[in-house]
Amino acid sequence: MDLFGDLRRMNKRQLYYQVLNFAMIVSSALMIWKGLIVITGSESPIVVVLSGSMEPAFHRGDLLFLTNFHDDPIRAGEIVVFKVEGRDIPIVHRVIKIHEKENGDIKFLTKGDNNEVDDRGLYKEGQNWLEKKDVVGRARGFLPYVGMVTIIMNDYPKFKYALLAVMGAYVLLKRES
């Protein structure tokens, strides 16, 4: 595959068309993502389960669909995705206890289904309960093992860059017939 030879053989109009086509694909993906954020109320409407802590409910590589409507109360037994201060990666675990104050504030405790102990060891130092502000979303549906592609790309960065390069080259060099 002679990438640069194909680019040289294209006239300027074809090259501009292919670059514009590529830009439209990227911008469409971003618009869809932002639309999902607005519709679901979650800053991250789709997440991948990265560990086996929620087995048998969810397995590593499952793709979760989230919502985060603030008027909907959190209940014990619900599966939430939350972020803890000092950690970049959100955690997917089940709410096991709810603590409601007289003023209506709700705090809750989580635990992975496959873990022996609750998540207090995962929370920031001195934090014993999560609050609604820590929640990224609540699991509403899932696709089994579809997220394994994401896990593979994170575990093997060279594979990710090779795949992106091949896809980019395909979009740029594909000619309309």
Image (cartoon, rainbow, N blue to C red):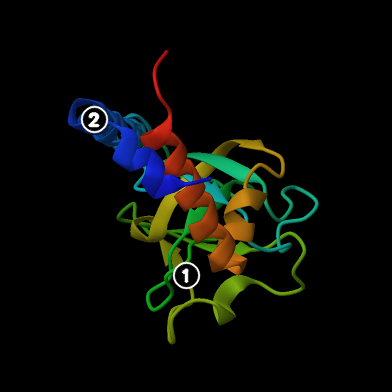
Residue 129 place in picture, x, y as percent: 47, 70
Camera-near label (1 vs 2) is 2
Task: Locate residue 70 relative to residue 107 in the image: left or right.
Answer: left
**Label 2: how many residues lie within 10 Å, few (<14), some (14-19) or many (20+)?**
few
Task: Locate residue 113 relative to residue 166 in the image: left or right.
Answer: right
Viewer-proximal residue among 167 and 127: 167
- State which quadrant residue 67 falls in: top left
Disc 1: which residue: 129
Marker disc for residue 33: none
Q: Secondary structure at mark 1?
A: loop
Residue 92 place in picture, x, y as percent: 58, 57
Viewer-proximal residue among 3 and 127: 3
Q: Look at the picture and state if 28 lies above or below 125.
A: above
Q: Residue at x 26, y 36 (%)?
A: 19
Give the amino acid type for the residue marked by disc 1 in the picture.
Trp
Q: Look at the picture and state if 95 lies above or below 124.
A: above
Q: Secondary structure at mark 2?
A: loop
Viewer-proximal residue among 34 and 114: 34
Tell me if residue 173 can be seen: yes
Quadrant containing the C terminus in the rendered view? top left
Viewer-proximal residue among 124 and 10: 10
Residue 49 place in picture, x, y as percent: 62, 54
**Label 1: how many residues lie within 10 Å, few (<14), some (14-19) or many (20+)?**
some
Of labels 1 and 2, earlier in sequence is 2
- State which quadrant residue 69 falls in: top left
Disc 2: which residue: 11
Task: Locate residue 124 relative to residue 17 in the image: left or right.
Answer: right
Distance in Å between CA atoms under marks 1 and 2:
62 Å
